[in-house]
Amino acid sequence: MTIQFNDETFYGDFTFKNSDWAIKRFPFPFHEDSYMYSVNMEPHKSYRPGSVFERTFDVDEHYVSEMKDRARVLANDPLRCQSLPHMTLAGWDLVELIMEAKAAEYPDLFELHKDGNRWRWVNKPLGIDDTFTFLDESTLPYGPMEYITRQTQGDFAVLDQRDDNLWMDAGMVTTQADWSLDFDIGMNFFEWHAPVPKAHEMGIFVRALKFLLNIQQGQPARRLNWTMTINPLLDTSPENYHKWGVMKQGLTRENIGDKQHLRVELQTFFRLPRSNALVFPIRCYLISFNDLVKVPKWARRLHRVIRDLPEELAAYKGFIDNRPLMVEWLSQFDDGSPTSDGIWPDDD
Amino acid sequence: MSAGTAKLNVTVAEVKPVNDLVTRFKFVRTGGGDLPTFSGGAHTVVEMQDGDITRLNAYSLMSNPADRGAYTISVRRDDQGRGGSRFMHTKVKEGMEMVISNPVNLFSLDLRAKKHLMLAGGIGITPFMAQMHQLSMMGGHFELHYAVRTASLGTYARELSERYPGKVHIYHDDQNEAIDLNTLLANQPLGTHVYVCGPKGMINWVHATAEEMGWPREAVHSEEFLAPASGKPFEVKCAVSNKIVQVGEHQSLLEALEAAGIDAPYLCRGGACGQCETNVIGYDGKFLHYDHWLTDEQKAGGKHIMPCVSRFEGKTLVLDR
Ligand code: HEM
Ligand code: FES
């Protein structure tokens, strides 16, 4: 199907909205009625046509507006996009990965024509038609990573792999759940994960890193992560905490269904061929509580997960103060009946 | 999850003897089309159907990483070894179809380096050939010091000297030429990274010398292909799959598990990546740990084994597979 792109905002008047299509394909992250951290990684294989797991890089109705929001955030704070000098080659790898995947999987939206190193890239939704020389930076308006990630939904961390570790040496980060590229740049896997509770003691990061170091070309992996956000705000950065932190105080019984959003990240991992770096796209999906409870199974399950979530996780994810209100509101949709295994709605 | 290496179907496009010991093989995609790009230092695992035995050997890709039309590898005949190299030398002919893995890089360049100092011994030259292609394309600064036994066994020595004038230094064992490592390391600019690939003795020598001279550990890189060691046959009990598996003299434990239809993860098949780590449930005998992955305590502990390279001698071994 051809996608109808929404004209919407993720700040100010917050006109962001999910269509019925977007609600139905929302990546609900809970496969059972409780949640704890785990090494939840699986191959990034095409799965369930129509779902967000079908394509290498999912494009949906929010694409055009998300890219406008990214441009707005970057105009205010250019440090959201950084690439240390040795990461330029990885940037080109990313250009190739995204352009080839999108042109093959969305031929009605994107085209890539190659004549040796002379490439023509057509991005119809954003009205872009550029010809450039692959591996020649002077032929693009931005560095290669910035160029392609201004045209791709989701944040991107590009990790250099050396000394049996991963180093956050480049990234485009404008839709993050309260972490900062400018703070994390140059850090390694254990350093940037330091604030996460419990997972270190559980040995999750040691095992996850082992797995990531071994990810190879042609065998990408993925996992889901989640948190909570008031208002459909993509840019919940520490840099702007003074603007969005206060929104958490205005939550009431009356506005919670509308304002409270479940925020889910589809995280994928790809080995990049020329640089041997790893790219970590973090794609953010938002859904309001009102829309989420349209799927009865999700409503029952979310109530139970939030109610029983360990304190440390609720505190780290930043919703411990609003948890009682969330649980109370969600409880009206939970009649106690059992929920089926897996993340998908029952009516399929 | 088992991370089986993604496979590529290829056809042998050329078999070319380079000297008395080394033969070069060129692979193109069966049915045409591009092969995946790779980075200098990457290897591919070649599958060899040798009668009843499937052999899997890792070989460094030596061709230009930017050339997606073909991959080339060079194989040194090892008459002492398990027969993988002998198979390549005697059985593999032009036009033959083979299966190889996607490129995997366990020996990649540190792209932050101001200068790349490469030290090769013998057939250890091959990963550097791809790295030099890559660096010269990117305008990177590199220098190769290459020790060979004799001029006639100096695989690619002449070609490389011609291709990169002033950057390639050859040392002939039979003329008592040797790399003066202390002087070489002492004269490197700040920000140099050292890479070594060759026999085990050479690798240890470079690491030890660099450490003595105060080089940071992360500026010294090595890759050593452990040929899976042959050894006495032994028997394993696999508790999960409830099977008894015989490991032959010229077979690795990993190969024996695979032949028995047991899902055994692997990646490098050379004792380096950690993917095949397997829990030991019980044993009576002695482990022969040949891997670089387990810590010394783990090796002494008798609770883990890396089936791709390590073996066992004794009465019983029970694995969690
Ligand atoms: C290389 C890719 C990865 C990058 C760049 C990355 C980055 C991050 C960052 C920046 C944070 C926020 C930390 C903070 O509070 O400042 C985070 C949180 C976290 N990461 Fe990762 N991560 C990666 C891979 C993984 C993997 C493979 C796992 C586990 C299997 C993992 C598990 C977690 C968990 C559990 C959290 C806490 C999230 C929450 O509760 O909301 N990460 N990660
Ligand atoms: S497969 Fe890499 S250590 Fe065994």
Image (spheres, rainbow, N blue to C red):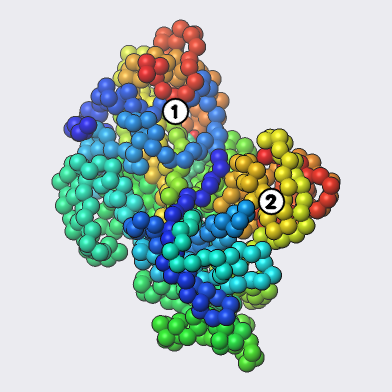
Callout 2: SS:
helix
User: Mark 1 and mark 2: span between their CA atoms?
Assistant: 39 Å
| Picture quadrant where residue A125 is located | top left
Q: Numbered disc 2: what chain? A: B
> Residue flagged by tag 2: what amino acid is it?
Leu
Asked whether the residues under marks 1 and 2 belong to the same chain, the reply is: no
From the viewer's perspective, is the residue at label 1 or at label 2 nearer?
2
Q: In this view, does B307 lie to the left or right of B234?
A: left
Residue visible at 43% across and 76% down in the picture: B141
Residue visible at 41% across and 10% down in the picture: A333
**Residue density around tag 1, few if under 14, some if 14–19, many if 20 or more, within 10 Å:** many
Q: Which of A346 and A137 is in front in this view?
A: A346
Q: Nearer the viewer, residue A248 or A225?
A: A225
Mark 1 = which residue? A29
Query: Where does the image place residue A137, in percent across and percent down from the top left?
Result: 27, 64
Query: Where does the image place residue A106, in percent across and percent down from the top left?
Result: 25, 41
Query: Where does the image place residue B84, in percent across and percent down from the top left?
Result: 61, 63
Q: Nearer the viewer, residue A209 or B54?
A: B54
User: Farthest residue toward the top?
Assistant: A335
From this viewpoint, is residue A112 visible?
A: yes
> Residue flagged by tag 1: what amino acid is it?
Pro
Vertical position of residue B1 compared to residue B203: above or below:
above
Mark 2 = which residue? B253
Residue visible at 44% across and 54% down in the picture: B8
Query: Where does the image place residue B93, in percent across and percent down from the top left?
Result: 49, 67
Q: Is residue B139 left or right of residue B118?
A: left
Residue visible at 65% across and 75% down in the picture: B202
Q: Numbered disc 1: what chain? A: A
